[in-house]
Image (cartoon, rainbow, N blue to C red):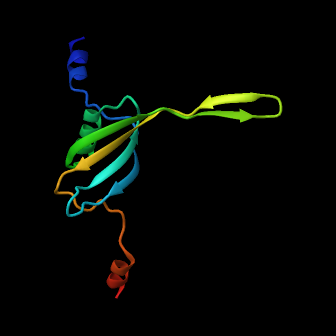
Amino acid sequence: MFASRIVSAFKMWMPTMPMTLVGSRNATKYKPATATFRVLPKMTKHEVKEYLTKIYNLPVVKVNTMNYMGKRKRVVGKRKVIYFKYNDFKKAIVTFGPSLKDLGQGAKFEQIEAEGK
C-alpha cells in the first residue's frame, strides 16, 4: 500500500499533446527567430514553453497564443443536407532567444553548389 504512494509521487509527465509546426522564420539583425505551432486548445502558454525547453532544449523567450473556432460546413447531397464542424485549435507563436539563429529551413542553391565544388 505504501509503495504505490511512493511510486505515484515520482511519475514523470510525458506530453501526449501534439504540436504541429506551421511555419518558422530565422533570426535577422532586428528580429529574433520565431516559429508558429498548431496545438490543442487546452494547452497553455506555460505548457508550450515547458514542452519546447524540456524536450528539445530550445531557448524560448515568449509565447503568444490565438484561439480559433473550427469552421462549420454544409454538404448538400441528393437526399440530405449534412452539417459538420472542423475541430477547434489554438495557434502558438513562439519567440526564441538570441542564441538561436537558424531554424534549419534549408539551404539556398548557391550554398549547395558551393559545397558540391
Q: Residue furthest right?
A: 78
Q: Residue at x 25, y 11 (%)?
A: 1
Q: Is residue 37 visible?
A: yes
The image quadrant of residue 53 is top left
Q: Residue at x 31, y 31 (%)?
A: 44
Query: x, y percentage for residue 17?
Result: 38, 35
Query: x, y percentage for residue 24?
Result: 35, 55
Q: Report the quarter where the C terminus lies.
A: bottom left
Query: x, y percentage for residue 54?
Result: 23, 42
Instruction: Tell me: residue 3, above or below residue 52.
Output: above
Q: Residue at x 78, y 28 (%)?
A: 80
Query: x, y percentage for residue 103?
Result: 30, 59
Instruction: Tell me: residue 104, above or below residue 1.
Output: below
Q: Is residue 19 visible?
A: no
Q: Residue furthest top?
A: 1
Q: Residue at x 25, y 60 (%)?
A: 27
- Asked whether, in this view, residue 60 is left or right of residue 117, the answer is left
Task: Out of 33 and 20, give the one closest to the viewer.
Answer: 33
